[in-house]
Amino acid sequence: MKLKFNILFVLLGIIALTISCKKVFDVDHPGGPITPEQEWGSPDFVKGYVTNFYNILPSWNRNEELAGEAYSGGSGGNGLNSFLKGTYTSQSGYPDRVWDWGRVRSINNFFANIDKSKSALSDADYKSLKGQAYFFRAYLYYRMVKVLGGVPIITAVQDPTADINTLLVKRNSVT
């Protein structure tokens, strides 16, 4: 009897907590959500969007020691050890991130929307931000071509709900 009472008490407690927690998850942001018009109309948001591209650049621990005998076993684990032992296969994956289509899409989204910001930005900032985005897109393609060979060059944001034939972009050659 006491066990049934304890179970009932715990269940009622859980029900009471879940009912009373509804407002915890309904967070209202001051000013509401940020709209695309606010994002692309604000110089600070546009500069922040481009600043996020700097995460693409390599950091200190990028597994550059793979090609030499300097590898100490660091954070790479068994994948890097198999690389040095000569047992690394195509099934092991590449130790560096080179499949960057999400980042290419983000940069293409920038190019699709930057003209909306032209009136909010100074001419120098507008040109500088576009130049930085061109560099990062070229850098991403350089990394992908270096590892994967010819890749499709996609310079516009693709609509994932479009006809599949429009999404299948032909792979370019390296030459």
Image (cartoon, rainbow, N blue to C red):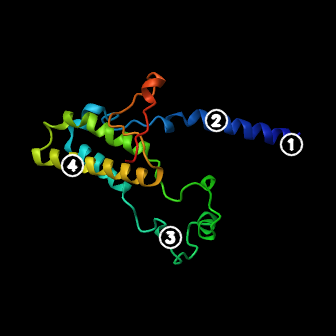
Please say if the residues under marks 1 and 4 sit with CB atoms less than 8 Å apart: no
How far, Cα to Cα, is label 2 from label 1? 21 Å
Query: Which quadrant of the structure image shows residue 163?
Result: top left
Please say if the residues under marks 3 and 4 sit with CB atoms less than 8 Å apart: no
Residue type at mark 1 is Lys
Q: Earlier in the sequence, mark 4 or mark 2?
A: 2
Please say if the residues under marks 4 and 2 sit with CB atoms less than 8 Å apart: no
Residue type at mark 3 is Ala
The relative height of residue 34 versus residue 163 in the rendered view (above or below) is below
| Residue linked to disc 1 | 2
Q: Nearer the viewer, mark 1 or mark 4?
A: 4
Rendered image: mark on residue 131: 4
Rendered image: mark on residue 56: none
Q: Nearer the viewer, mark 3 or mark 1?
A: 3
How far, Cα to Cα, is label 3 from label 4? 33 Å
Please say if the residues under marks 2 and 3 sit with CB atoms less than 8 Å apart: no
